[in-house]
């Protein structure tokens, strides 16, 4: 395991060419150091959260709770294998008060507000946060909670995550490490994305292949004002290290990023599983060769030999093609409608 590459906020000129276009993770120290909600200590963090509540008067929010026996982890229970948390609605002021009550305790439940659009609960704050690296139309989301962690999972969009309060540790794994991360069921996940079954410190007797993932991993600890770029589909494990933590993140592209022009590749994966689950190994191998040629283009452009006016979707999916394909697939998937 090695540290993630770092740059400073004053040196962003090469971000797009060196990191975004090459899908390489990087920590950007001080990227959001001018944000008005930064706080390092729990006392300062609680005061700023109370000020936000008084100034913007958010209504009820959806939070997650995981019992103390789960040792700070939100995901799958290490005892039962089932999801180990519950969701409930509560007033924001009550949420902050409960966070404060948990601070002095040694072994506590995890309490967290997760992935909520800032402009829906703090519209004034949303107008004061700047993100120079992504499209201004990308809506930031906020995560607030006490000490806790989420296991390795991926997102289908590029992610810039900014630490506003407390400290967080990020551990990243390249996409190809999926076979060493022991992911859970992809149709029953903690938050929609495939997620590891392992705890933060896995039992290697139970999960021996994780040693390979650990060798390939990269890590960083972020302070208030720091940010990290996590490329699409990179596995990331996130640990909130302070008693009070606030993270703001921006997803750009993909279905989770709200790109209206993007179709979900994960949905296509699920459909592929549906269509191929009963095939023999020989037929699966044959289809994998077709996919490699037409979809993943391992041999180059599969339409290069076809006259330009005859290439159809192999020559590039236009908006007309997109509508036609969706109509065709809808009719095939729902023949009785």
Image (tube, grey):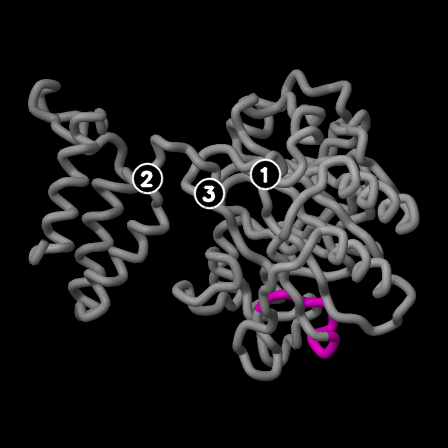
Does residue 112 appear anywhere in the picture? yes
**Can you say whether 70 is above or below 179 in the image?**
below
Q: Which residue is mark 3?
A: 256
Magenta residues, start to end: 68-75
Q: Which residue is mark 1?
A: 120
User: Helix or strand or loop: what does disc 3 sit on?
Assistant: loop
Q: Is residue 74 magenta?
A: yes
Q: CA distance from mark 3 to mark 1?
A: 17 Å
User: Helix or strand or loop: what does disc 1 sit on?
Assistant: helix
Residue at point 43%, 67% (across, down): 188
Residue 234 percent coordinates (x, y): 54, 47
Q: CA distance from mark 2 to mark 3?
A: 10 Å
Residue 151 percent coordinates (x, y): 61, 61
User: Helix or strand or loop: what does disc 2 sit on?
Assistant: loop
Q: Nearer the viewer, residue 144 or 75?
A: 144
Q: How many marks?
A: 3
Query: Quick check: 196 left or right of 192?
Result: right
Q: Which residue is mark 2?
A: 263
How many neighbours does mark 1 have within 10 angstroms: few (below 14), some (14-19), or many (20 or more)? few
**Can you say whether 107 is above or below 234 in the image?**
below
């Amino acid at each position: 395991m090695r540290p993630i590459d770092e740059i400073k906020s004053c040196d962003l000129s090469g971000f797009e060419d060196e990191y975004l276009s090459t899908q390489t993770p990087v920590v950007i120290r001080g990227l959001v150091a001018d944000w008005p909600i930064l706080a390092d200590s729990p006392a300062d963090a609680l005061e700023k959260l109370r000020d936000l509540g008084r100034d913007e008067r958010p209504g009820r929010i959806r939070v997650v709770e995981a019992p103390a026996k789960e040792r700070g982890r939100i995901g799958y229970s290490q005892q039962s294998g089932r999801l180990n948390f519950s969701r409930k609605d509560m007033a924001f002021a009550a949420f902050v008060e409960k966070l404060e009550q948990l601070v002095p305790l040694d072994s506590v439940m995890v309490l967290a507000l997760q992935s909520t659009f800032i402009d829906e609960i703090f519209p004034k704050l949303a107008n004061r946060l700047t993100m120079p690296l992504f499209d201004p139309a990308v809506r930031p989301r906020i995560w607030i909670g006490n000490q806790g962690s989420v296991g390795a999972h991926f997102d289908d969009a590029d992610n810039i995550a900014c630490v506003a309060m407390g400290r967080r540790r990020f551990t990243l794994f390249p996409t190809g490490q999926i076979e060493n991360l022991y992911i859970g069921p992809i149709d029953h996940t903690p938050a929609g994305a495939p997620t590891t079954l392992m705890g933060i410190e896995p039992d290697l007797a139970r999960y021996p292949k994780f040693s390979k993932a650990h060798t390939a991993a990269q890590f960083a600890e972020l302070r208030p004002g720091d940010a990290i770029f996590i490329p699409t589909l990179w596995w990331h494990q996130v640990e909130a290290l302070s008693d009070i933590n606030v993270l703001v993140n921006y997803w750009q592209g993909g279905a989770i990023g709200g790109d209206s022009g993007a179709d979900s590749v994960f949905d296509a994966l699920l459909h592929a599983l549906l269509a191929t689950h009963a095939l023999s190994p020989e037929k699966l191998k044959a289809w994998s060769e077709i996919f490699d040629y037409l979809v993943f283009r391992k041999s180059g452009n599969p339409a290069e030999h076809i006259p330009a006016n005859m290439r159809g979707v192999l020559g590039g999916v236009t908006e007309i093609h997109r509508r036609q394909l969706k109509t065709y697939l809808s009719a095939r998937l729902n023949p009785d409608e």
